[in-house]
Amino acid sequence: MKKVLFSVLALTFTAGTQVFAQDQAQVNTISAPASPVATTTATAGATIATDASEDNRTAVDPANLPEAIKKTLASDQYKGWQLVSASLVKGKTEYYELQMKKGEETTALKLDKNGNVVS
């Protein structure tokens, strides 16, 4: 009887461990990049986290972005990146969030009105 009970307990523990391991494999960790462009690879079912401090977001026509931001995007650092959309975010600080794409890679770039990267 002890052997049967031990076997059931061992089987339950093993099954629980496998389920936990599968859940952990689905967690993606994003670390801060060395460059100001935080690059992520586009995948199906990806979730984008937003900052809770973002109070107000307004879509902005890319043609109406400040000249300093246009100059930053035209620099060699962002060569090959295409601007997909832009938003003005007003909260603790005011900045422009730019959705960028380069091939299959996408990124969200945050710049202030002077074209400086906001962290």
Image (cartoon, grey):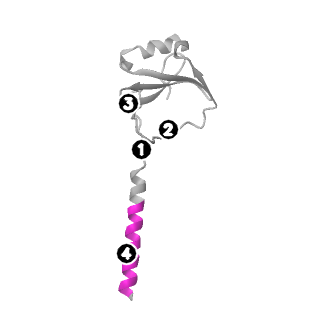
Q: Residue at x 42, y 40 (%)?
A: 44
Secondary structure of residue under mark 2: loop
Q: Amino acid at mark 4?
A: Ala
Q: Which of 78 and 31 lies nearest the eye of the viewer?
A: 78
Say whether disc 4 or disc 1 marks the residue closer to the N-terminus.
4
Say whether disc 1 or disc 3 marks the residue closer to the N-terminus.
1
Q: CA distance from mark 2 to mark 4?
A: 39 Å
Q: Residue at x 42, y 66 (%)?
A: 16
Question: Any magenta on residue 18?
Answer: yes
Where does the image place residue 66, in percent across and percent down from the top left? 54, 13
Q: Residue at x 41, y 45 (%)?
A: 28
**Residue pointed to by mark 1:** 29
Q: Which of 50 and 104 lies nearest the eye of the viewer?
A: 104
**Most distant residue in the front direction:** 44
Q: Main secondary structure of the magenta part?
A: helix
Q: Which residues are magenta?
A: 2-19
Q: CA distance from mark 1 to mark 3?
A: 17 Å
**Residue pointed to by mark 4:** 10
In the shown orientation, is residue 6 left or right of residue 96?
left
Q: CA distance from mark 4 to mark 3?
A: 44 Å
**Residue pointed to by mark 2:** 48
Say whether disc 4 or disc 3 marks the residue closer to the N-terminus.
4
**Residue pointed to by mark 3:** 105
Q: Quadrant of residue 106?
A: top left
Where does the image place residue 103, in percent across and percent down from the top left? 35, 27
In the shown orientation, is residue 77 left or right of residue 66?
left
Q: CA distance from mark 2 to mark 1?
A: 12 Å
